[in-house]
Amino acid sequence: MIRGHHFLLISLFIISCEKDDICIEGSENTNRITIGFLDNETKNPTGITLINVKSIESDSIIHEEFSGGSIKLPLKVNSNKTQFLFNNKETLDTLTIYHQSIHQYLNRSCGYISNFLINNQTEIIKSTGWIREITVEKDSIFNEEKTNIFIHY
Amino acid sequence: MKKKQIYLFIISIWLSTNMLVSQTELNSSDSLVKKDKLLTINKLRLGIDLFKPIKSSSEGDNLNYEFIGDLQVTENLYLAGEYGLIDRRIEDENINFNSSGRFLRIGFNYNMFKNWVGMDNSIYLGLRYATSDFSNKIIDYTVRNQDSYFSNLVDSEYQTIEYSDLSGNWIEIVAGLKVETFNNVYLGLSLRLNKLLSHSKPDNFDTLFIPGFNKVTDDNTFGSGFNYTLTYSIPLRKKK
């Protein structure tokens, strides 16, 4: 007579060997927007020093005492609008970015990431503080290699 | 917690198998000589899975039923099948979604247990071909993001994603036992090992759960499941 429990033991073995899915480090990830700073007269990349950068709805600060030629900021994955407050020498300008958030499925363990398309038709709202002009250089965000938006000041 | 249940189940099925087997060995000498017949359609058994509704209420399923049946065709061979309905909210690692559908398994069981006179228990091995059609609705998910300044949770306020007309099919090996506890009433346990053959691949999502098959993993097409069943036998011939 065939012993049922041989089969069961094998089953037990297979069940115990079920792997846990882990999202591998270095898998694709949601990228940030890259914002560069240009001198409004010479149109040359010019470094800037900001007191801080934060979201308009939140008190917590993304970057404290930022200094450099370009800054990377997260966009909202669950909205078509992300607004930032740039504090330059206590002058606060609001940058409103309209974008599409395009979610891309990777696999079970990593889930979704988001890519973005900056909405070119919509003018990016700016205050009349220190920011003079805004230009969109590259409207798609599928990586962080290129500068997407330039702030002229 | 699931693993613990599986272990308990396996231990219980093993113990009862051993008990039944030792019974058989004791009495193999005085087993009955039966007449050779090509077909012995004696009984049709219909029943339900007892555990599914209990499990579903504890897991918050909207629906989880499984109906089972087998038809004796020869002394030890049974045509067997299961039909089930599942509507379940699945909380996966990154994605919570709803899976709703039905499945049908068709195959046979072969009984390896020699009964005493008047007894009708069975220990069987079986094979099934199974198919399921279902739909998925994504409830919410957390976007993988290196930056967590903003919330990365996406729910139906942002977008609703639904997939219908999904399907999967697989084969199963079944091992189980059925014990006649009252006249014509059987309690059964079975363990099944599944091997996924194919499934649909929705755009920008994947099949993570198939009703009747259970969880589908990224790099493993095997699955498992078990049933606790209660069946009633409809006698097709009068017992002599």
Image: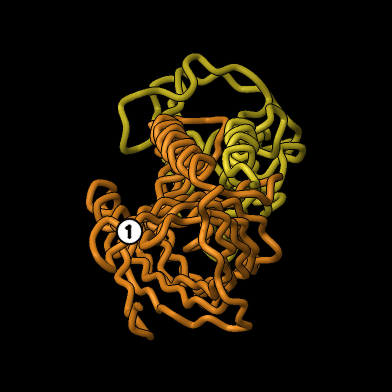
Chain colours: A yellow, B orange
- List x then y, in percent, for residue A113: 59, 46
Task: Identify the residue at image location x=53%, y=81%.
Answer: B40
Task: Tell me if B135 is positioned left or right of A105 in this view.
Answer: left
- List x then y, in percent, for residue B67: 36, 71
Whether residue A135 is visible, yes or no, is: no
* Residue type at numbered disc 1: Glu
Whether residue A51 is visible, yes or no, is: yes
| Count of residue discs | 1
Query: Which quadrant, please, contains the N terminus of chain B?
Result: top left
The answer to whether B176 is drawn above or below residue A28 in the figure is: below
Q: What element carries label 1?
A: strand
Query: Which quadrant, please, contains the C terminus of chain B?
Result: bottom left
- List x then y, in percent, for residue A74: 53, 36
Task: Tell me if A118 is positioned left or right of A82 in this view.
Answer: right
* In the foreground, A88 or B109: B109
Task: Tell me if B57 is positioned left or right of A142 in this view.
Answer: left
* In the foreground, B190 or A86: B190
Q: Which chain carries label 1?
A: B
- To which quarter of the image does residue B125 belong? bottom right
- To which quarter of the image does residue B172 belong? bottom right
Q: Hey, which residue is sitting farthest top in the picture?
A: A65
- List x then y, in percent, for residue B116: 43, 55
Badge 1 density bin: few <14, some 14–19, many ≥20, Cα 10 Å: some
* In the foreground, A96 or B122: B122
* In the foreground, B137 or A53: B137
Task: Identify the residue at image location x=61%, y=55%.
Answer: B194
Q: Name the residue under label 1.
A: B180
Task: Identify the residue at image location x=45%, y=43%.
Answer: B20
The answer to whether B53 is drawn above or below residue A92 in the figure is: below
